[in-house]
Image (cartoon, rainbow, N blue to C red):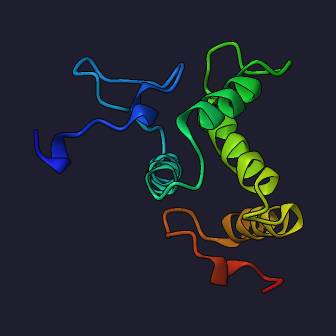
């Protein structure tokens, strides 16, 4: 089996939406980016599979989740952010500021145009 054929254990994350072929399915490009970032950080040794699984499970079982699972990747991002903050790799305030900046950028971007941080009117 080549390195390209090795399946990351992250692809076996609980509740991960998959196609009929068993491949991850992403509702938006940012969800694929979040998945890829998580795989990369795991492969670089920043956290163990068991740490990731525990953090994601915690997020997935919080009250108020969407009954249809449509917030799965919101939970994914929250789990990744929480894990990176807990390990001292990222700062919670910086993550929050970036999330807010992306939200303002999205709101300021004309429909059909790519969202870029440069579109945040406060940047």
Quadrant of residue 116 within the rendered picture:
bottom right
Q: Nearer the viewer, residue 123 or 121?
A: 123
Q: Nearer the viewer, residue 3 or 31?
A: 3
- The image position of residue 61, as x and y in percent, is 76, 18
Furthest-right residue in this view: 93
- The quarter in which the N terminus is drawn is top left
120 versus 90 height, above or below: below
Furthest-left residue in this view: 1
- The image position of residue 53, as x and y in percent, is 61, 29
- The image position of residue 34, as x and y in percent, is 53, 51
66 versus 34 height, above or below: above
Left or right: 91 in relation to 105: right
The residue at the point 63 percent across, 38 percent down is 76
The residue at the point 26 percent across, 17 percent down is 20
- The image position of residue 11, as x and y in percent, is 40, 32
The residue at the point 74 percent across, 78 percent down is 120
Left or right: 19 in relation to 30: left
Left or right: 47 in relation to 120: left
Quadrant of residue 17 within the rendered picture:
top left
The residue at the point 50 percent across, 49 percent down is 42
98 versus 71 height, above or below: below
Quadrant of residue 71 within the rendered picture:
top right
- The quarter in which the C terminus is drawn is bottom right
């Amino acid at each position: 089996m080549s390195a390209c054929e090795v399946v990351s254990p992250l692809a076996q994350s609980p509740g991960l939406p998959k196609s009929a072929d068993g491949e991850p399915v992403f509702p938006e490009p940012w969800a694929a980016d979040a998945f890829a970032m998580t795989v990369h950080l795991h492969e670089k040794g920043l956290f163990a599979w068991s740490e990731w699984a525990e953090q994601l499970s915690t997020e997935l079982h919080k009250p108020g989740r969407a009954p249809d699972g449509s917030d799965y990747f919101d939970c994914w991002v929250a789990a990744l952010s929480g894990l990176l903050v807990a390990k001292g790799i990222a700062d919670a305030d910086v993550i929050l500021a970036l999330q807010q900046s992306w939200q303002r950028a999205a709101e300021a971007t004309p429909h059909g145009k790519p969202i870029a941080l440069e579109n945040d009117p406060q940047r």
